[in-house]
Image: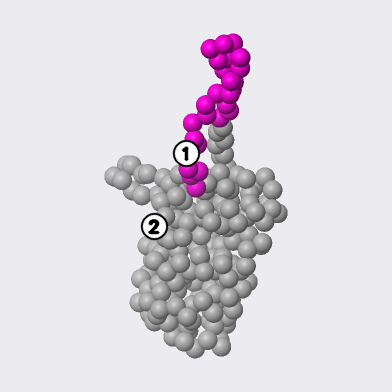
Amino acid sequence: MRNALGIAVVLLAGCTGTSTPGPSGAEQLAVVPPSEAPTAQTLGGAYAAYALTPASGERQRAYFHTFPDDYATLRNLFGFEEVGEDSVAFGQYYEQGNDMIGAFFKLDSLPAQDIAAKAIGIARNGVWQADGVGYFQHFLMKHFEGTPTTYLGILKSSARGDQAGFWKFYADGPEAFPQEDKARLRGLLANEPGQLAVLDSVLAMQPLGH
């Protein structure tokens, strides 16, 4: 598991209307053009607002709704891509990955089921990557171990392919899934033979690592 420093950036913008003198010298209200439709709050802005008052339910919900819903977006924001032999493109929030992803799993004013459902939606198509994606996997594992019934309830109602994708990402990494982690996970799944079967099938096909 890896750790990273977190940095939050917030952009604020505003506009004001002023009064202008009319032809006769009397003041008239300036014509203010209709404002553009409000754009969705950015992930960075929502996180910065949350970080100022982390106990605010409203700001927690705003951050939850701006957090990625799928793996491709998560990797695009927090991960990196090797463009060439000596060139790497880093996601917009690569440096803040540890703090921002960790915060997502700590949104305690949201039902644990909502957090789990979004996390499963991301993980089901995931592939391990160092740093940002690895942070997500780390916090996902901790959250799962703290609320296994919540995750299992969602997984059991999911398509088998999504179940397999979730467990594949869960166990993915730079090396084979550690025996200690495997034993702990099998203990959590002791009363879930269906999930154990899916997990075992995934582990049987697991490569030796990245």
Identity of the residue drawn at 29% across and 44% down: 84
Answer whether residue 32 is visible to the viewer in this image.
yes
Question: Picture quarter containing residue 124?
Answer: bottom left
Pick the front one: 172 or 104: 104
Query: Is 71 left, or right, of 11 in this rendering?
Result: left
Circle 1 is placed at which residue position?
Answer: 36
Image location of residue 209, percent across then percent down: 38, 66
Answer whether residue 7 is visible to the viewer in this image.
no
At mark 2, the secondary structure is: helix
Mark positioned earlier in the residue sequence (2 or 1) = 1
From the viewer's perspective, is residue 18 above or below residue 153?
Answer: above
Q: Amino acid at mark 1?
A: Glu
Circle 2 is placed at which residue position?
Answer: 72
Identity of the residue drawn at 33% across and 42% down: 87
Query: Is 86 left, or right, of 95 in this rendering?
Result: left
From the viewer's perspective, is residue 93 above or below residue 159?
Answer: above
Image location of residue 2, percent across then percent down: 53, 55
Give the magenta-colored segment's residue range. 15-40
Image location of residue 143, percent across then percent down: 59, 67
Q: Amino acid at mark 2?
A: Ala
Give the main secondary structure, helix, strand or loop, of the magenta stretch.
loop
At mark 1, the secondary structure is: loop
Pick the front one: 205 or 73: 73
Instruction: Give the distance between the C-alpha atoms of the residues marked 2 and 1, in whole angstroms.
Output: 29 Å
Residue 21 among magenta residues = yes
Q: Quadrant of the C terminus?
A: bottom left
Q: Nearer the viewer, mark 2 or mark 1?
A: 1
